[in-house]
Image (cartoon, grey):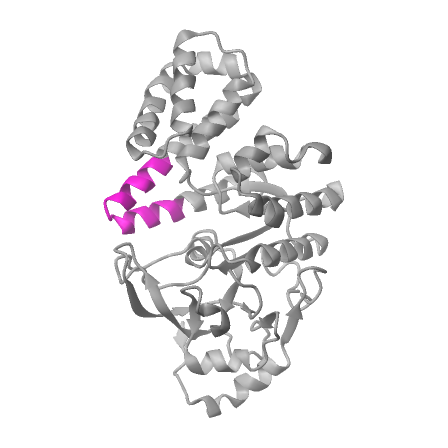
Amino acid sequence: MMIISLKSYAQFDTERCYLQNNFEPIFTDTSCGLACFSEPADKYRFYFTGEKHDHKGNTNIELALLEQLVNDRKIDTYILENSYSGEYLLKKFLSLPDTSLEDNPYTRLLYRNKKKDFEEYYLPLYKLIDSTPQVLRPELRGIDVEMNLGQAYRVLNLIMTNHEVTDTTLLQFKAKIEKAGRSKGKRRLYGTAEMLDTIFYQKLDLFQRTLKTDFEDFEKIVEGIKTGKSWLMNMDTSNYQLAFETREEFMLQNVKGVLRDNPQANFFGQFGFTHVVGYRNLWLNKITNWKSLATRIESDLGLPVCRTVIFYTKTLSRKIKYLAMQAEYERLFEEFAEERLTIFNLNKPESPFRNNDVPVKREYCETFDGNDYPVDISLEFNYVIINNYFQL
């Protein structure tokens, strides 16, 4: 990719003229203002949004884009930066009658007493899916590793609770995963993962007979725990390169699995920046020659990904370490940004941004040693959303 050389702010007349005619405000409460997110239906099979986690506006944007793409019949699969145990819980939750959404074990395990998550994401998603005609409802698929081992153990225990377990070995197995699901200690979480390998595969036939139609879900979570444990242990030992590459490859293989089930599937997913944009290096060059999930999909599957990134303005950055464009580009986009959310289409044939990287500066790089370091990177994307409204 060719990188745009930095110019003085006054020299951006071409870029300024283009942006002035290719932006729209977004009103996420009414799902309008996303008309420019309207590429021809056959242009992309993947629509990805990159964001910084835990920012309040992200779920609003995610659900608005999901609704737009579903209504436009551009996607039929909603992939989650979540594991198979998360997928299992979410599907169970979405299948509940609306009279019992809050008082059931699936909801309780989903948000673990975080009422905010229920109100800002799970309940609006439930309403969105429930109001969507059956023929248009997207398939939900969790493609990430089981990073939250505690959640995985809690879901395994819930599945076993729904069946009559009489075998002594299985009862001991259930007691251990129940205890691990309440634990925060890594020794117990990792030790239980090792126990799963030993007992589960030795007693495979017994698990199949006991769990019946739930066995396949149970086995997928057990398999995910193995990869999740490996990822966590690599992070613990500062083997970031292997940890990150293992995770991206795991996600890619799960995307391939969806395509095996449905070769014509079209996808939407909202992820952290790392999985969407074309970083060169991460974590002070501790991770080099980086290939994100989006990049792997394009290079390995030959399928283009429509990438949209969310930037947070300086008015919000006092409270968060944020990803910001280089000063000249930042001023250029914010010149037209509305007070709420604004989406810029950089994707038209006449766009001066096509086939170029917009220079980006991450003002603070959060590293695992607890310190902050400046680092320059470049990103590749098709749309930009400027968040000038939602606080943390």
Residue 193 visible in this rendered orientation of the protein: yes
- Residue 341's x, y, as percent? 60, 68
Magenta residue check for 276: no
Count of labels in the image:
0
Magenta residue check for 247: yes
Stretch in magenta: 227-249
Left or right of 195, for residue 30: right
Residue depicted at 71% across the width and 56% down the height: 72
In this rendered view, identify the residue nearer to me: 183 or 240. Answer: 183
Tell me the quarter of the image containing the N terminus.
bottom left
- Residue 359's x, y, as percent? 41, 75
In this rendered view, identify the residue nearer to me: 204 or 170. Answer: 170
Q: Is residue 253 above or below residue 272?
A: above
Magenta span: chief secondary structure: helix
Residue 265 visible in this rendered orientation of the protein: no
- Residue lying furthest bottom in this view? 10
Residue depicted at 58% across the width and 68% down the height: 389
Left or right of 121, for residue 254: left
Residue depicted at 70% across the width and 60% down the height: 31
Q: Is residue 162 above or below residue 28?
A: above
- Residue 43's x, y, as percent? 61, 61
Residue depicted at 31% across the width and 31% down the height: 190
- Residue 169's x, y, as percent? 39, 11
Q: In this view, does 310 lie above or below 140?
A: below
